Structures are given as structure tokens and as C-alpha cells.
Amino acid sequence: MSDQQVQFFPFHGINEFMLNDYRQSVIHKVFSSLDKLPPDQRSRLVGSIKRLVQVPGFRNSALAPLPLKLKGGITAFEKYPQFTAQVLEAWATLEGDLRQQVFELLKSRGWELLPIETDRSKLPGFLIHWPKDETYEIINQAYNEMFPSSTAHENDVRLMTVWLADRLPIELDDQEEI
């Protein structure tokens, strides 16, 4: 990869890989758990909600009731890459146990990852290369074998894999550098 330019896919491109109901559940979890985020992360996200989430009748959309804010949040998640990244970083923070488990799983499978505490929302986007031998099904199976008592949903494992690896399966490659 030394002679190739690194390509990034904007964070909001993840919408092409997410089911509508699942996207809504991720945003709902984040919006309903803002008080559980570290203060600096919460402050940045609330600022983005104020700026980017449109809620009719509210000048400050962060103060809108959750159901109204959720609808505007979905639109912002689909439209603004940095908002998408902040929501996903918050979701990963809220899913701390799953984050640690998926990190351990990917490391054990030879994935090269940024340190777990890295704020991935500050990256320029997702890398587009994905190892073709590491399908979502294979990762989910390996996760279930490594953490048999986990109750994590397969979509959560997949999203955490994408987030921690900072990769979307756009271009499938032979097992090179992952």
C-alpha cells in the first residue's frame, strides 16, 4: 500500500450499510444516554445537535423531547459526516464492554487497530479496504465463540467492528494489511 494513496469514505456513508431500524436504535441509545457520556464528549455532541439537528418549533433542538429530536437526528446522521462520527463515537463509549470485547477479538485475529481510547470521530472517514476473508458472519461467529455468554446483537458486533477498525467493506482485499 506504500505506492497507493489512502482513500477514505465519509462517515455518513455508513448509512448505506445500516438498516433504518438499527440506525434509529443507535441514535436513540445515544440521545437518551447523553448524561452517561464523559463531559467533553457530551458537550461536543450537544453542540452538534444544536447546530445540525432540526426540530420544528425549537431554536435549541437539544432541548426538544426525545421523539422529536430523534427524527431530526436521523436526518443529520444521514447528511453530516462529522455528526455521524460523533454519534458513533458516543455509541461506542456507551457500549464499553462490547467495545473492549470486539477490540480483543480483532487484535486476536491480526487486525491492526488504533488504540482503543482513540477518538475515531476525529479521523477523516472510513478506510475502504476490507479483508475479504473477514466477513461479518465470520466475525460474528468468532465473537460468539470468544464471548459465549455475551448477549450482544450481531448488528452491534458488526458496527463496533466497523468503528474500531475504521473500515467499511467497500473494496474486499486479500489478507494484506488490516
Image (tube, rainbow, N blue to C red):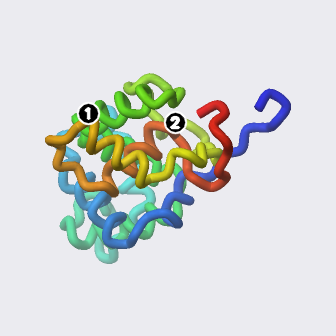
Helix, strand or loop at label 1? It is: helix
Q: Is residue 9 above or below residue 23?
A: above
Q: Compare residues 38 and 54 and report the one nearer the observer.
A: 38
At label 2, which amino acid type do we have?
Lys
Q: Earlier in the sequence, mark 1 or mark 2?
A: 1
Percent from the top left, x then y, of residue 172? 65, 51
Residue 125 visible here = no
Secondary structure of residue under mark 2 = helix
Say whether marks 1 and 2 touch (CB < 8 Å): no
Q: Residues within 10 Å of mark 1 (few under 14, many from 20)?
A: few
Q: Amino acid at mark 1?
A: Pro
Q: Which residue is mark 2?
A: 122
Quadrant in the picture for residue 173: top right
**Residue 126 in the image, given as x and y percentages of width and height:** 58, 45
The residue indicated by pointer 1 is: 39
What residue is drawn where x is 61% and y is 41%? 124
Looking at the rendering, which quadrant does residue 92 occupy?
top left
Q: Is residue 67 above or below residue 90?
A: below
Say if residue 53 shows up in the picture. Answer: yes
